[in-house]
Amino acid sequence: MLDQLAKFLVVLFVVVDPPSMAPLFATMTDGASAGYRRRMAIKSSLVAFSIFVAFALGGSRFIAAMGISIDAFRIGGGLMLFLIALDMVFAREERTTPAENAETRRRADISVFPLAFPLISGPGSIATVLLTFGAARVEPLLYLGLLAVIALVVALSLACMLAAPLVMRVLGVTGANVVARVAGVVLAALAVQFVIDGLKGAFGLG
């Protein structure tokens, strides 16, 4: 169980990438008051956690109702995570479309969009949650541990947003880029493993 929790922590941390939230949050809230930044950070974290919990507890039943096997979702999720890893390694940092960016600039409340979704609980992290909970044994203690891991990663994202000015001073642009690229390489390997596990399950290769 500890191995499952550790693997889930590594994957979810890499996909969500809490340190990257610091420069993004600092840019989005540039010139805003400390109170506004604190409200946006806390609200976005609560919304993201709620999204994760909803997919963790009901996601498997949803994809089953759609006629999608967990192995198929594991393969699709692995491919999606691999694309995210490529974006991280090659510094293609744009996570939202130009239309979404324009919408962000027009809105006073940025907590739900784009902070909670897609920056914290985006397609890659939701796929990670679905894959992990779908493959997990039905053990209350394991489920509680996985939910605790989600809470920890979201809390780290919250901490990075609140500490955005300090994090940017410590890491700098170069440091943030190095961390993102190393995390991208790790995520690529984990994504490939997801695809391999999915193919084994789909074709009964054990």
Image: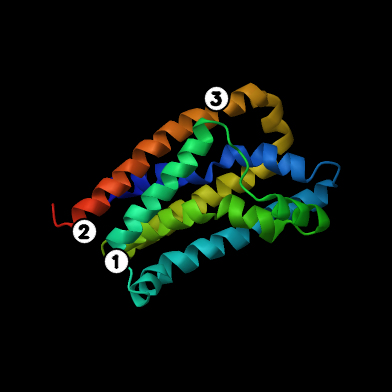
Categorize mark 1 by other alpha carbons within 10 Å: few (<14), some (14-19), many (20+): some
Distance between mark 3 and mark 1 Cα atoms: 37 Å
Instruction: Look at label 3 and name its amino acid.
Output: Val
Q: Are marks 2 and 1 in contact (CB under 8 Å)?
A: yes
Which is more N-terminal, label 1 or label 3?
A: 1
What label sits on residue 69 in the rendered view? 1
Give the x, y percent position of residue 14: 47, 41
Q: Residue at x 40, y 37 (%)?
A: 188
Q: Which is nearer the eye, 106 or 9?
A: 106
Q: Which is nearer the eye, 193 or 30?
A: 193
Q: Nearer the viewer, mark 3 or mark 1?
A: 1
Give the x, y percent position of residue 197: 25, 50
* Outermost residue to the top: 174
Categorize mark 2 by other alpha carbons within 10 Å: few (<14), some (14-19), many (20+): some
Q: Which is nearer the eye, 45 or 16?
A: 16
Render colour scheme: rainbow
* Outermost residue to the front: 98
Give the x, y percent position of residue 30: 81, 41
Residue denoted by label 2: 202
Q: Secondary structure at mark 2?
A: helix
Residue denoted by label 3: 178
Q: Nearer the viewer, mark 2 or mark 3?
A: 2
Q: Residue at x 25, y 46 (%)?
A: 196
Q: Residue at x 51, y 48 (%)?
A: 153
